[in-house]
Image (cartoon, rainbow, N blue to C red):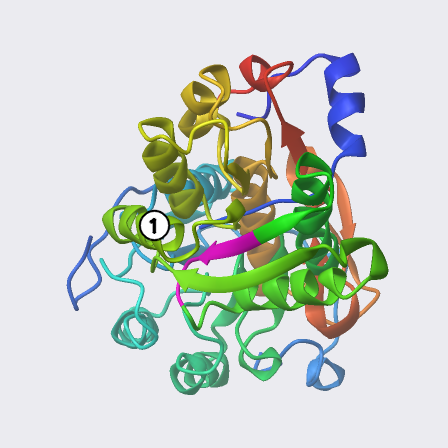
Amino acid sequence: MFLRTSSGRRAAASVAAACALAVTLAGCGGTTKKDSSDDNSGGAKAVDAKANPDAPLKKGLKLAFLPKQINNPYEKIVDDAGIEAAGEFGGKGKEVGPSDASASSQVSYINTLIQQRQDAILIAANDPNAVCGPLKQAMKKDIKVVAYDSDTAKECRQLFINQASSEEIGRSQVQHIAKQLNYKGEIAILSATQNATNQNTWIEFMKDELKKPKYKNMKLVKTAYGDDDDQKSFQETQGLLKAYPNLKGIISPTTVGIAAAARYISDSSYKGKVVINGLGTPNQMRKYVKDGTVEQFSLWDPKKLGYLGSYAAAALASGQITGAEGEKFKAGKLGEYTIGKDGEVILGPPTVFNKDNIDDFDF
């Protein structure tokens, strides 16, 4: 289920940093995709409950994964792994969600999951605040809330399962493309949606990194939004290149965006002239690395992200943890994790993929 890599390649990959990112059709009733057989928030109210680290994981737990959108290949990998993990501890997982990634598109699904009395809702938020009202209602009914991949506001969940340090992801995106461009030239960012929490957090760190003296000959000319839609991301890439004829590089910290940008560049006169970097999956990006369109990109293992999220939700629902800083829980094959500030749990450092190691991975 996890990455296939030799120990040597794994060591080389762990030196790298950066990552990325973004999901699969439904209607307002919460279309279900695949099953496998307390009111506290981000540690803020954890003092009202007591953790019992020795409590066994409850059997028959019902976990629902709510991705940004249900037709995103990356989030399908995450959610399927989480659903499979639920089967390991005798729980039952499912995936529901909207077909678009708009700010309010997840609200009706949360309301339906509350009515279904799920034990835990795991959500990759399209907007940090638009989902807060119903998520707070869920927590009042003792349904545990775990954000993953893209956070909600801290008071609207108990835990956030983060792929890697947000600062590391953001800064490393700039560091990588700067080296490729010899620290010179205009660059643009091709993001997902304007309200995506993870994207905006990473972009703020990118902008801060660019303020350092060593980037004085680089300029961020535009942040475009492809809404995690393949065709729109493709068109936004085309628009950036036409609007900025001196553009030397594009950072796309979203798996949908980087693949669309690479597809456009690969069949254009810009191939070999404009650098594409960002966050993608090896299976998605393999052909663009091998044909020379893309030199490198980054990501964490999305299977591990979903797996960790599932075990974290089960630990919450079983009373092993409350979401308070310093609490520990075991995540099956991944081992023990410690909850950090504001209920954050970090999966681990991302991997940089290039022609030397991309064939060692299959996801």
Q: Is residue 175 magenta?
A: no
Q: Residue at x 45, y 67 (%)?
A: 125
Residue 4 falls left or right of residue 102: right
Which quadrant of the figure has residue 219?
bottom right
Residue 50 falls left or right of residue 126: right
Give, as a three-letter code, the residue at label 1: Lys
Q: Is residue 44 above or below residue 193?
A: below
Element type at mark 1? strand
Instruction: Give coordinates of residue 166: x percent, y percent.
Output: 68, 59
Q: Is residue 174 above or below residue 53?
A: above
Instruction: Give coordinates of residue 356: x percent, y percent.
Output: 64, 14
Q: Main secondary structure of the magenta part?
A: strand
Residue 194 falls left or right of residue 147: left
Q: Is residue 190 magenta?
A: yes
Q: Nearer the viewer, residue 143 or 2?
A: 2
Residue 75 in sight in this render: no
Q: Nearer the viewer, residue 160 or 361?
A: 361
Q: Residue at x 32, y 48 (%)?
A: 238
Q: Residue at x 48, y 15 (%)?
A: 290
Instruction: Give coordinates of residue 103: x percent, y percent.
Output: 34, 75
Crowding near the residue tagged with mark 1, few <14, some 14–19, many ≥20 C-alpha atoms within 10 Å: many
Q: Nearer the viewer, residue 323 or 214?
A: 214
Q: Nearer the viewer, residue 248 or 228?
A: 248
Which quadrant of the figure has residue 160?
bottom right
Magenta extent = 187-193
Residue 142 in sight in this render: yes
On the image, numbered disc 1 is attached to which residue?
94
Q: Count the marks: how many? A: 1
Q: Residue at x 43, y 28 (%)?
A: 271
Instruction: Give coordinates of residue 122: x percent, y percent.
Output: 47, 61
